[in-house]
Image: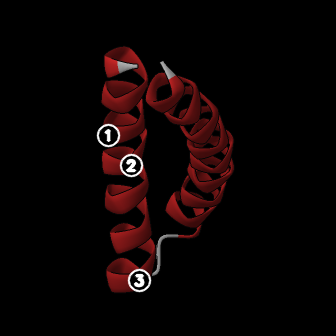
Amino acid sequence: MKELVEKIQEVYAAFEADANAQVEKGNKAAGTRARKASLELEKMMKSFRKVSLEASKN
């Protein structure tokens, strides 16, 4: 679970940087990367939810 949390933090940092580049500088390519990262984050968050529920049951 720790590895999953670290991966989520890594992908979120990339998302944040790209989203800021799009908003502040109008960088369209950064916006595309940010949207891609948001989809990855969505999948990882669902995985985290499943792992977290399993861990709380044990």
Q: CA distance from mark 1 to mark 3?
A: 21 Å
Residue placed under numbered mark 2 in the picture: 12
Element marked by disc 3: helix
The percent position of residue 4, horizontal first and vertical second, equals 43, 23
Q: CA distance from mark 2 to mark 1?
A: 5 Å
Answer with left or right where residue 9 lies relative to residue 34. left
Element marked by disc 1: helix
To which quarter of the image does residue 11 belong? top left
Task: Report the amino acid beneath label 1.
Answer: Gln
The percent position of residue 40, horizontal first and vertical second, equals 63, 41
To which quarter of the image does residue 45 belong? top right
Task: Report the amino acid beneath label 2.
Answer: Tyr
- Identify the residue at horizontal 43%, vertical 68% (top origin): 19
Query: Compared with residue 11, is residue 36 higher up or lower down, i.e. above or below?
Result: below
Which one is in front, 38 or 23?
38
Q: Residues within 10 Å of mark 3 (few under 14, many from 20)?
A: few
Which one is in front, 17 or 1?
1
- Identify the residue at horizontal 69%, vertical 50% (top origin): 39
- Identify the residue at horizontal 47%, vertical 18% (top origin): 58
The percent position of residue 6, horizontal first and vertical second, equals 30, 27
Image quadrant holding the N terminus, namely: top left
Disc sitting over residue 23 in the figure: 3
Q: Residue furthest front?
A: 58
Answer with left or right where residue 52 lies relative to residue 42. left
Element marked by disc 2: helix
Query: Compared with residue 52, is residue 35 higher up or lower down, i.e. above or below?
Result: below
Residue placed under numbered mark 1 in the picture: 9
The reply to whether callout 2 and callout 1 are in contact (CB within 8 Å) is yes
